Amino acid sequence: MAIEQATLGGGCFWCLDAVFRDLRGVSHVVSGYAGGQVARPSYEAVCTGRTGHAEVVQIDFDSAALSYDDLLRVFFAIHDPTTLNRQGHDAGTQYRSIILVHSPEQKATARAVIAEIAASGIWEEQIVTEVTPLAEFYPAEDYHQNYFAKNPNAGYCRAVVAPKVAKFRQAFLSRLVTS
């Protein structure tokens, strides 16, 4: 088992958290904040858009079971990487599309996958996903962890998270964790 870590932001972290928990090869997911200038920010501070942080998930995965490039392909399938600082109705820099790399190899892979996705023609608009080194990751407050599983009937979960999870499960059926 070769555990690696990825840190990704693509809108609200509740959506990413819910999807990546279902992906075979992923052993741990933590919602949090990265890419900003304020140490140990709170959710309320990040929501103002003034801390510079993005809502992200930090993912531990077994690279023998799930390659980093395949993890990124899932990431690009579950959010719109062409909208600057926005995912659906969620707007602000905290919702930007961002890959926070942990190594030069991850940076090269991220750039290659972005080029592959751009060349595929899946998206008509230009991909605006940031690729930047991870400086610091701050776990979000406990109530944000595994939010969708704990709050499936919350309005945002029913309207936004559930459809995204359903779309992911349909597209990646063969890659789901089996109970």
Image (cartoon, rainbow, N blue to C red):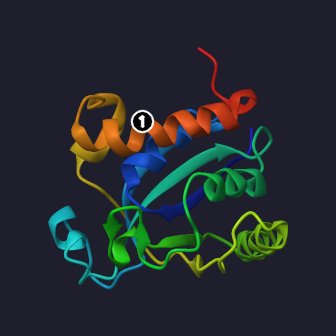
Residue at the image position 41 percent from the left and 71 percent from the top: 86
The x and y percentages for residue 128 are 59, 80
Tell me the crowding category of disc 1: few under 14, some 14 to 19, or many 20 or more residues within 10 angstroms, Cα based: some
From where the camera sits, is residue 135 visible? yes
Reply above or below: 116 against 2: below
From where the camera sits, is residue 24 visible? no
Q: How many marks?
A: 1
Residue at the image position 58 percent from the left and 52 percent from the top: 78
Quadrant in the rendering for residue 113: bottom right
Decide if residue 155 is on the left or right side of residue 28.
left
The x and y percentages for residue 119 are 84, 73
Residue sticking out furthest to the left: 44
Q: In the depicted view, which residue is nearer to us: 159 or 52? A: 159
Residue sticking out furthest to the top: 179
Decide if residue 31 is on the left or right side of residue 46.
right
Reply above or below: 72 against 1: below
Residue at the image position 22 percent from the left and 43 percent from the top: 143
Residue at the image position 47 percent from the left and 78 percent from the top: 135
Amino acid carrying mark 1 in the image: Ala
Does dot 1 land on a helix, a strand or a loop?
helix
Reply above or below: 76 against 2: below
The x and y percentages for residue 179 are 59, 14
The x and y percentages for residue 49 are 26, 79
Decide if residue 159 is on the left or right side of residue 15.
left
Q: Which residue is mark 1?
A: 162
Q: On the rendered image, what quadrant is the N terminus found in?
A: top right
Reply above or below: 138 against 29: below
Quadrant in the rendering for residue 157: top left
